[in-house]
Image (cartoon, helix red, strand yellow):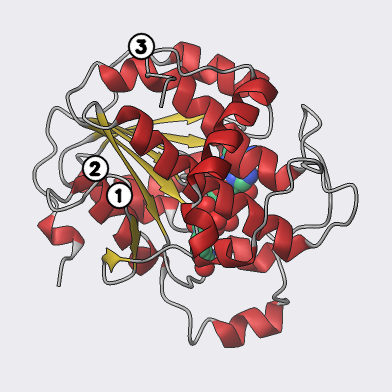
Amino acid sequence: MWTPDDIPRLTGSTALVTGANSGIGVPTVLELARHGARVVMTARDLAKGRAALETIRAEVPEADVELRRLDLAALSSVREFAASVDEPIDILINNAGIGIIPRSTTADGFETQFGTNHLGHFALTGLLLPRLLERKDARVVTVSSDAHAVGRIDFDDLGLERGYGRFSAYGRSKLANLLFARELHRRAEGRLLSVAVHPGSTSTGILKLGVLTRPVMALAGLFLQSAAKGAVPSLYAAASPAVRGGTFIGPGPKELRPRPHALDEAVARRLWETSEELTGVRFEMLDPHV
Ligand SMILES: NC(=O)c1ccc[n+]([C@@H]2O[C@H](COP(=O)([O-])OP(=O)(O)OC[C@H]3O[C@@H](n4cnc5c(N)ncnc54)[C@H](OP(=O)(O)O)[C@@H]3O)[C@@H](O)[C@H]2O)c1
């Protein structure tokens, strides 16, 4: 079975991990740094980010890790951050996620789960595309979920004005992550490798934010995997030579079959075009005639 010990030496590579201050993001950064990558870890709250950075440095003293601020729920922050990235990127891990929360909107007025988990990462990836294409075979890993199964995209109601469910809204954002990863693979095949992952049910903050109360969370923690285990699909997708573009990697790690509605190329294309319009970010270096 593949484990993070199988990650090849990454010396000379730069990786960027979003939402790296807690949960699955921390061991993702830690293992990439342990294997020699320079890692840019991002957090929307720098105080939380510094605490995570200290944990990582305590375990990997030689880690070449830099902490930068990025709020995916504000396109101005995404633009400011991307403009500050002036080095080639080998690995981008779109890991940050907000989940199962009451209805709210981002700084730009998008429903928060869709706006953060999908549109924020869509814009980030598009703005970093020139930095990714400076490398041969850069990888973009987008953290989706098996919760995509309950997601549906109604292009006439992207704000979910006609009815909001916390879990279905989360499922919609994770479906969008998966459709995006596969559409990026189709558009960028041969130029970069795009993969989606499902970490498996993991004891992290996202569940505490959501449906699980503190006592239930404590009980559930007995059955949920650790954040280190939850990071394995992301690490495998980021670093294993065996990974194929356009796939969906889950616990094992192994390839998972997405639900049929996540394989709908017409929906993926429409989501891409809609996301370009909503964010104002266009992937100009990729072939639009697909
Ligand atoms: N845990 C699971 O069982 C599970 C299952 C399937 C998929 N996933 C996915 O795994 C990924 C990692 O989540 P996790 O389980 O590790 O949960 P987590 O501990 O809550 O981590 C989520 C991270 O995303 C960050 N984030 C939230 N909103 C953000 C924003 N507006 N801008 C920038 N960063 C933001 C959080 O920052 P703050 O600390 O500031 O909130 C945190 O660092 C997510 O994409 C999630 O959907 C998790």
Seen at 15% across and 39% down, the residue is 36
The disc at residue 86 is 3
Q: Nearer the viewer, mark 3 or mark 1?
A: 3
Quarter of the figure with residue 86: top left
Q: Give 266 or 57, whichever is nearer the viewer.
A: 266
At horizontal 54% and vertical 58% (from top left) the residue drawn is: 261
Q: Nearer the viewer, mark 3 or mark 2?
A: 3
Q: Position of residue 162 (x, y in %)?
A: 90, 52
Task: Report which quarter residue 199 is drawn in.
Answer: bottom left
Q: Amino acid at mark 3?
A: Asp
Position of 110 with respect to 232 (left or right) is: right
Which amino acid is tagged 1?
Leu
Left or right relative to 5: residue 164: right
Q: Is residue 286 above or below residue 12?
A: above
Q: Secondary structure at mark 1?
A: helix
Asked if the residue at tag 2 contacts the one at tag 1, i.e. Cβ–Cβ closer than 8 Å, the answer is yes
Residue at screen point 48% across, 79% down: 224
Q: Nearer the viewer, residue 205 or 277?
A: 277
Q: CA distance from mark 3 to mark 1?
A: 23 Å
Image x and y of residue 145, in percent: 50, 61
- Residue at 68 percent of width and 34 percent of height: 73
Q: In x, y percent, where is residue 5?
A: 13, 60
Residue 182 coordinates in the image, percent (x, y): 41, 44
